[in-house]
Image (tube, grey):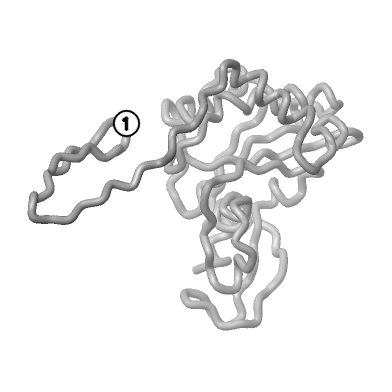
């Protein structure tokens, strides 16, 4: 049996023996939006179970937007500029908006890779873009301690978070399909924790 698996930007061909009982699990077909930009703006204006973003950002003077690095395929080009423009219309100064790349312990995304990740020259030119460096303790603030023994951490593990993210008045997350569940750090398996705990946490939080 021949099967093409999505791999990187292409496919990985796989040949499986006919003697094998193979079941291919596929994602269900999803509808394609006619106008993704309008749909994003509509979501900011009329979110589910929340006030509009312009209301949440009222009287806010700084905002941090955490996005995943290149290891997570996210269409940042579709939503970053509308998100930033919405914050600016609400009164948040562009110079006080930062896009923080939640790299966790991964390498930083720089140069052409950064341009591809952000996907919009306007965003690169108008707001601050920073990579998170988990091993730079000076760039983190202590949020607390856990008393339980962790699998790969000491008995009393420090919880460190990116200072830029923690100290912003309004924090926004790109929600992913999965969370890293680490005993003692992620107790509620909510997808936002992938961007906050591993993504912008200090290295000593889980090592």
State the image coordinates of residue 40 (x, y, percent, origin top left): 66, 26
Vertical relation: 201 (above or below) 12:
below
Helix, strand or loop for disc 1: loop
The answer to which quarter of the image holds residue 183 is bottom right
Q: Residue at x 53, y 28 (%)?
A: 118
Q: Quadrant of the N terminus?
A: top left
Q: Which residue in the structure is indicated by mark 1?
A: 9
Q: Residue furthest right?
A: 59
Tally of marks: 1
Q: Residue at x 56, y 53 (%)?
A: 194
Residue 108 screen position, x and y as percent: 47, 42
Residue at image position (41%, 41%) is: 27
Q: Nearer the viewer, residue 16 or 88?
A: 16
Q: Is residue 12 left or right of residue 68?
A: left
Residue 90 pos. (x, y %): 85, 26
Q: Residue at x 33, y 47 (%)?
A: 25
176 in relation to 190, above or below: above
Q: Give the percent coordinates (x, y) of residue 112.
A: 42, 26
Q: How many C-alpha atoms fall within 10 Å of the one at disc 1: few (<14), some, or many (≥20)?
A: few
The answer to whether residue 91 is left or right of residue 200 is: right
Position of 161 relative to 34 (above/below)? below
Left or right of 38? Residue 116 is left
The answer to which quarter of the image holds residue 122 is top right
């Amino acid at each position: 049996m021949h099967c093409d698996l999505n791999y990187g930007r292409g496919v990985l061909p796989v040949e499986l023996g006919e003697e094998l009982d193979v079941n291919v699990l596929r994602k269900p077909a999803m509808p394609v939006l006619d106008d993704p930009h309008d749909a994003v703006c509509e979501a900011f204006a009329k979110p589910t179970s929340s006030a509009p973003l312009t209301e949440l950002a009222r009287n806010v003077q700084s905002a941090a937007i955490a996005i995943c690095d290149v290891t997570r395929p996210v269409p940042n080009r579709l939503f970053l500029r509308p998100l930033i423009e919405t914050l600016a219309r609400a009164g948040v100064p562009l110079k006080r908006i930062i896009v923080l790349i939640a790299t966790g312990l991964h390498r930083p995304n720089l140069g052409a890779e950064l341009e591809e990740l952000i996907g919009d020259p306007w965003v690169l030119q108008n707001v601050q873009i920073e990579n998170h460096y988990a091993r730079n303790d000076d760039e983190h603030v202590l949020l607390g301690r856990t008393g339980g023994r962790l699998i790969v951490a000491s008995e009393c593990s420090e919880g460190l978070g990116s200072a830029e993210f923690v100290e912003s008045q309004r924090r926004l997350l790109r929600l992913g399909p999965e969370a890293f569940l680490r005993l003692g750090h992620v107790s509620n398996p909510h997808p936002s924790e992938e961007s906050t705990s591993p993504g912008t946490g200090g290295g000593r939080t889980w090592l």
